[in-house]
Amino acid sequence: MLVTILTVGILSCSTTAKTSGGVSIVAEGRSQLSPEKARLYDYFFLEAMIQRQKGQNDAAFDLLNHCLEINPHAAEAYFFMAQYYSALKQAEKSLDYFQTAARLNPQNETYMETLAQVYIRQQNYQDAIAVIEKLYERHKDRENLLEMLFQLYQEVDDFQNAIAVLERIEMIDGKSERLSMAKSEVYTRMGNEEAAVEEMAALAKQYPNDLNYLAMYGESLMMNGETKQALEIYNRILKEEPNNNRVLMSLRTYYQSLEDYEMADSLTRRVLLGRSTSLEEKTYLIRQIIGTNEQAGGDSTEVLRMFHQMMSVDTTDVDIPMLCATYMDLKKMPSDSIKPVLNHILRLAPDNSVARLHLVGYAWAEDDKDRVIELCQTAREYNPDDMAFYYYQGIAYYQRDSLDQALSTFQNGVSVINEKSNADIVSDFYEVMGEILHKKGRVEEAFAAYDSCLQWKPDNIPCLNNYAYYLSLRNENLSKAETMSMKTLKAEPKNATYLDTFAWILFMQQRYAEAKIYIDQALQNVDTVALNGDTISNAAIYEHAGDIYWYCKDPDKALVFWQDALKGDSENKVLIRKVKLKKYFKE
């Protein structure tokens, strides 16, 4: 209680307090209150701020209402109530309270600025202007208020005052390109072409050695119909700077307006092939050319010719060739025409992973595993942390049955894993590593790889299936195997391979009747086996069906399934014995 009394005493002296939102507030309108009411007001207002800080907004709202009953002239209470009414979507009431707060304490900048923002949101620009002008009268050092006024005067088409605001800014900052261009544009909107041109002329005169400002003056003349004088200025500039791209671009626009496309195209090539042309300028122009070309029917011949000319002039930059390759790809041009551009990029920048991955994609589509391996091996020298190259190279080795090289590649790729690595790629790394290790008889290492795979991606379905199946073959952790296998069935309920795995896990648990249900479903969906057309995979399903039917007391049907399996796996010695002796045998 002592702390509360002391705090109330401080507020009673009208010192500034801070709310949680950082807004400075003062208990206002105090001269009209008795000392007792002032203390009472301070107590309830402070309690309102405490509740507000705690997030108890209903309580704060009620307390602020009570504050206004005690002191109807308390600007700070109106200000906070206005915020609550705004949150309650009561716009008119909120505005009324913000206006009251600002009227009661016009010296409070927070109240005034908030009111101005409310007016702006309501597109009441005239009232916003009035508030901001009052603020600026008190704070001539706040240039941001002038910037706001400039925008607002334009919103209400008060161009004279917009110009006056720019002149006020000029008095602070001095004449500049930004301000002169803004003034010229406003004059143009006013229809005062002479003033628009004079403004740019004054800028060029103030900086006579800057041809860029002279070019801007020429552009202003051109924009306002003074074509002859503009062309004279352009020619004057080009005599001093033949490759002044600003002027060349303006002339290009001029000749396009005259429909003199031959002259415009000549200027286009002059800019694009100019050694002083920036990448931004080249990119802007070539994109414009592509857009125009597409509107005219999309004949890519001229665009490609321009790209190749640009690449022949600039033999160091890769951005234009990259844009060329992207354009060709979007136009669905054959890979044989795109690959030379990508190879050109790699000659300039061997570490360009985007171009190299593009080439890897083409080699992959063409089933050129040797090329994939070669490209990825080189990439690993320049981009040693890019896991994609390890992935494609490892898969290429794996599909080529070079297991040792595939395993080495994946292990090297795993070594660059970090917290930002792509979880899907990392998961696939471990999955394929598990397959390779299992094929090499390193079963415990294979299972460890599968565990790592599932840590990165718990729903890696192929991994879940293979891991579960291999556990069942070893008659280990069958409960874990069953859980994993069930996840695969939820993901692909008609996949014959996954149905077969689940049936076999049930078989290993001696749950033969249940196993029969799932093996029958596998047989119904045998065409959807993961490796369609793989007779070995199909043979395994038929053999499992025979084993399950044997234990379900149907030896005749079991024999039929074993015979079907033998058609696809004629070297299986255990299967041969089953058919020959017409009975089940373990391996």
Image: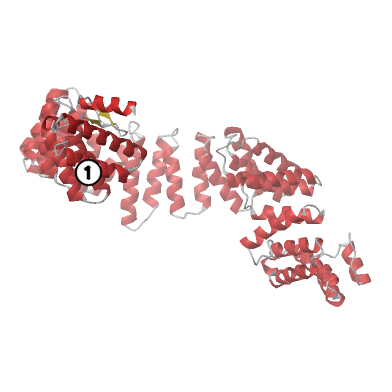
Question: In this rendering, is residue 549 above or below 119?
Answer: below
Mark 1 Cα-neighbour bin, 10 Å: few <14, some 14–19, many ≥20: some
Residue found 18% across the figure and 42% down from its top = 69
Q: Residue furthest bottom?
A: 556
Give the x, y percent position of residue 186: 12, 39
In this view, the residue in front, 55 or 502, is 55
Quadrant in the rendering for residue 131: top left
Quadrant in the rendering for residue 578: bottom right
In this view, the residue in front, 477 or 446, is 477
Mark yes or no: residue 275 visible. yes
SS of the residue under disc 1: helix
Visual colour scheme: secondary structure
Quadrant in the rendering for residue 179: top left
Residue found 25% across the figure and 36% down from its top = 44
In this view, the residue in front, 229 or 72, is 72
501 with respect to 274 (left or right) = right
Question: In this rendering, is residue 173 above or below 454?
Answer: above
Q: Quadrant of the C terminus?
A: bottom right
Q: Quadrant of the N terminus?
A: top left
Give the x, y percent position of residue 35: 16, 29
Q: Amino acid at mark 1?
A: Asn
In this view, the residue in front, 242 or 447, is 447
Count numbered badges in the picture: 1
562 with respect to 482 (left or right) = right
Mark yes or no: residue 235 visible. no
- Which residue is denoted by mark 1 in the rendering? 65
106 with respect to 500 (left or right) = left
Give the x, y percent position of residue 213: 18, 29
Give the x, y percent position of residue 568: 80, 67
